[in-house]
Image (spheres, coloured by chain):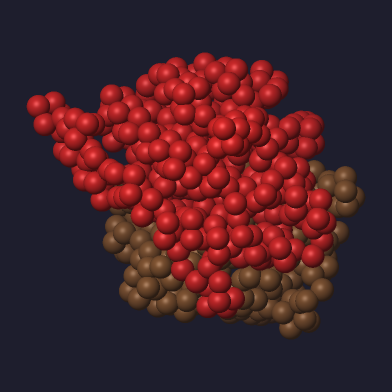
Chain colours: A red, B brown
């Protein structure tokens, strides 16, 4: 089985965008607040939205299961207050749940959290529990900067976040560290803010005791770990200068990298410097980069092709990257797949 | 000749740190303002500060000339106002000038700019002109975020910066894009803020018309370009999705990357994906990472060793990386070296 651990629902029907527009327009004017019930999207529309996109690419590229979450840029935790963020998260997560029910062999859910700048992360626990316990989701996306590029909150290693981590550990779900859209003109969302968020989170972890406090807490750093693997020597040296243990012992029981790196040399670097046990296959399709690379004739984000072409990866290595590591990091994945199989058989 | 285009004066005598401390303490209390004349550092102290460090490493590693500038973390443009930044920049640049005079074969200067958050970049022109015209400096370090990690100013591509760029073009000096210390708890300075600054600047350039307006303006993005070469496929794809020309035509007449990447796989990636004409040798020594890699027995930041070991680089490629490209990007370098040679001969 080939599991893509990083896919967002980026092909939503127009009604969802229209609803969000009305929701944002109502900020500061409660009389205009749209009813979530006014958003009507039929199953056929949901099917149509993924049939020609995510499902088509799964078939064409030979991947099987996508760990699926709401559009990352769409989370926009910086817009409105907690109430806005909560309702928007509920709606987006419910759509993911419906798609997972429509295609139980193709999608398994990861939730958006109702984060809001300055608001206690405890307030995310209710929606996380609902998604995991009621919907069978297996993880969450955690935004290290709900301010959208102003980085005005505390680092991920601050005790501010600990109640959420306690719940993640209890539920046995990991988080993918994923910023949302940037509202800071300095940061292009997919070309700078995303990668900066990845790099920033890794260095926060490196300089913390977080994994002493939470030995089983797990994070996936997407986009191939931002700048981290390319600068692995820098990070090894920084840790050494700080008299810290080697990065493997310090971080790699808890921190994992996905393979959303859109060229062969990048994937080769990733698989050379990061232990295979810490690499999870992902493509982020349909995502940040949608074109076909004229040099190869294939989609930039068809990352399976790159991994297939790395000559030093053994069959066992590839099994880990494509499947085994995701089953290990997403602790509820295997049981959830078994439950689905049983439900389909019965 | 082997030219290291990225070296900071990170081994300053204690008197400089003491002066800076007094300067900072006087912020808001002008009566305490220390006189720059009270800072006394003798030539012997300057010599001692580099003999056992930068000069020793030059000899040991077989490099010749370091393009030398004040400590990047020390610029701290976010501290105090323009007046504080100006005086501090003047003092730091004068020390660089003195070291360059003491060791004309080993160092050539690049200046710190007296940037200050929210202050018009025009106010940097005076110090830039002084350093170039009076001291023979050949470039400047430009901080894309003088707020020190809050990113509260306009992007580098905003017209706000244009008067400074006009002067750079007139003087024929490039800028290295280099943030300073972070005062945002989210960003570790050397492990996150530096690399984020590099990545951010590149994407700002990619989404701008800056080099249509300034076809001869040149920037060096340090630390191997942040996350950029590792994600070169992503950037190629993003540009393509935006219907922009290929990155080579769009940016690579104006944007260059240094080799401050502290392991062989990173340097291999850099030299595989970035055209050789756009790579400038640099080590950042004595800088962010000071230890010896136990896997190799050599300093992490001895980047010459990595380049020496890249099998696909021809002698001509190496000549460009080690010397030719720096002579090309730093337009005043060759003439300045000739002037020095003539002065020494006469």
Query: Would you say A116 lies left or right of A271 here?
Result: left
Residue A29 location (% of width, % of height): 12, 29
Instruction: Please state which of residues B226 and B289 is positioned toward the viewer in this rendering.
Output: B226
Q: Is residue A182 visible?
A: no
Residue B185 location (% of width, % of height): 51, 30
Residue closest to the far left: A31
Query: Would you say A268 lies left or right of B17 here?
Result: right
Instruction: Please state which of residues B44 and A120 is positioned toward the viewer in this rendering.
Output: A120
Residue closest to the far bottom: B316
Instruction: Please state which of residues B245 and B215 is positioned toward the viewer in this rendering.
Output: B245
Q: Quadrant of residue B110?
A: bottom right
Quadrant for the C terminus of chain A in the image:
top right
- Where A230 falls versus A100 (above or below)? below
Residue A300 location (% of width, % of height): 54, 66
Residue closest to the far front: A346
Residue B136 location (% of width, % of height): 54, 68
Q: In the image, what residue occupies the spot 22% across and 31% down?
A: A37
- Where A62 falls versus A174 (above or below)? below
Q: In the image, what residue occupies the spot 67% across and 54% down?
A: A230
């Amino acid at each position: 089985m080939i599991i893509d651990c990083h896919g967002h629902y980026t092909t939503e029907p127009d009604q969802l965008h229209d609803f969000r527009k009305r929701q944002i327009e109502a900020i500061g004017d409660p009389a205009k607040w749209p009813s979530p019930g006014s958003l009507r999207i039929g199953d056929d529309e949901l099917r149509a939205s993924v049939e020609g996109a995510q499902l088509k690419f799964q078939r064409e590229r030979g991947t099987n299961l996508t760990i699926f979450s709401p559009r990352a840029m769409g989370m926009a935790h910086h817009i409105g207050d907690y109430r806005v963020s909560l309702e928007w998260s509920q709606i987006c997560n419910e759509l993911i749940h419906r798609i997972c029910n429509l295609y139980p062999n193709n999608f398994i859910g990861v939730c958006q959290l109702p984060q809001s700048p300055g608001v206690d992360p405890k307030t995310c626990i209710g929606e996380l529990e609902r998604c995991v316990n009621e919907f069978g989701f297996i993880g969450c996306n955690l935004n290290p900067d709900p301010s959208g590029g102003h980085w005005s909150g505390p680092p991920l290693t601050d005790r501010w976040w600990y109640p959420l981590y306690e719940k993640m550990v209890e539920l046995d779900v990991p988080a993918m560290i994923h910023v949302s859209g940037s509202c800071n003109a300095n940061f292009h969302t997919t070309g700078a803010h995303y990668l900066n968020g990845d790099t920033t989170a890794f260095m926060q972890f490196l300089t913390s005791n977080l994994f002493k406090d939470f030995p089983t807490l797990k994070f996936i750093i997407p986009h191939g770990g931002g700048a981290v693997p390319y600068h692995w020597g820098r990070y090894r040296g920084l840790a050494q200068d700080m008299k810290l243990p080697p990065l493997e012992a310090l971080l790699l029981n808890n921190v994992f990298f996905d393979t959303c790196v859109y060229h062969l040399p990048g994937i080769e670097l990733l698989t050379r410097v990061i232990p295979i046990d810490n690499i999870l296959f992902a493509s982020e399709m349909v995502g940040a980069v949608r074109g076909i690379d004229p040099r190869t004739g294939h989609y930039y984000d068809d990352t399976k092709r790159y991994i297939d072409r790395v000559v030093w990866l053994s069959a066992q290595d590839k099994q880990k990257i494509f499947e085994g590591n995701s089953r290990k990091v997403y602790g509820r994945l295997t049981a959830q797949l078994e439950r689905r199989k049983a439900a389909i058989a019965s």
